[in-house]
Image (tube, grey):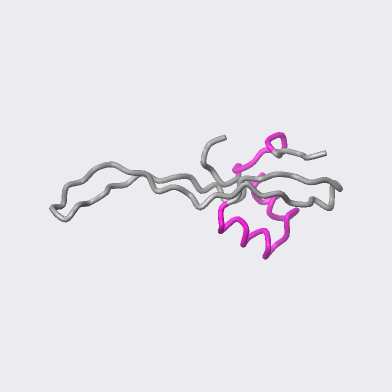
Amino acid sequence: MSKTCQITGKRSMIGNNVSHSLRRTKRTFDVNLFTKKFYYAEEDCWIVLNVSAHGLRIINRIGLDAALKQAVTKGNLKWEDIEVIG
C-alpha cells in the first residue's frame, strides 16, 4: 500500500532540501500516516485504515460511517480496499 491517507487522500509531496549555500537536492515530505483499527458499528466488525492525523480529526468530528462515505464519493477509497478483521 502506498503512503496515502484513505480518508483525505493526502500523499507524500516532493520538494527541495536547500542548504546554506542555496544548493538544492530533491527530497520527499511524507504524510503523518498511522495504521489504525476502528470499530465499524454499522457492519458490526473491526476495520483497519491507513489514516493521517487530519483524517483522524475528520473521523472524530463527523463519525466513521460519514467519513468513509465521504472518502468513497471523493474517490480516495473503495469499499473493496477496506481491510476487515474477523
Instruction: Please identify the residue farthest to the bottom as the structure is shown.
Output: 61
| Residue 6 drawn at (x, y percent) | 61, 45
Q: Is residue 38 left or right of residue 56?
A: right
Q: Nearest the camera: 72 or 34?
A: 34
- Quarter of the figure with the C terminus: top right
Q: How many marks?
A: 0
| Residue 40 drawn at (x, y percent) | 79, 50
Give above or below for 39 relative to 62. Answer: above
| Residue 24 drawn at (x, y percent) | 21, 46
Q: Residue at x 13, y 53 (%)?
A: 21
- Quarter of the figure with the N terminus: top right
Q: Residue at x 57, y 47 (%)?
A: 5
Q: Is residue 15 left or right of residue 38?
A: left
Instruction: Please identify the residue farthest to the right as the structure is shown.
Output: 44
Does residue 57 belong to the magenta stretch?
A: yes
| Residue 34 drawn at (x, y percent) | 59, 50
Give the magenta range.
52-81
Q: Nearest the camera: 81 or 33?
A: 33
Q: Residue at x 51, y 52 (%)?
A: 32
Main secondary structure of the magenta stretch: helix
Q: Residue at x 83, y 53 (%)?
A: 41
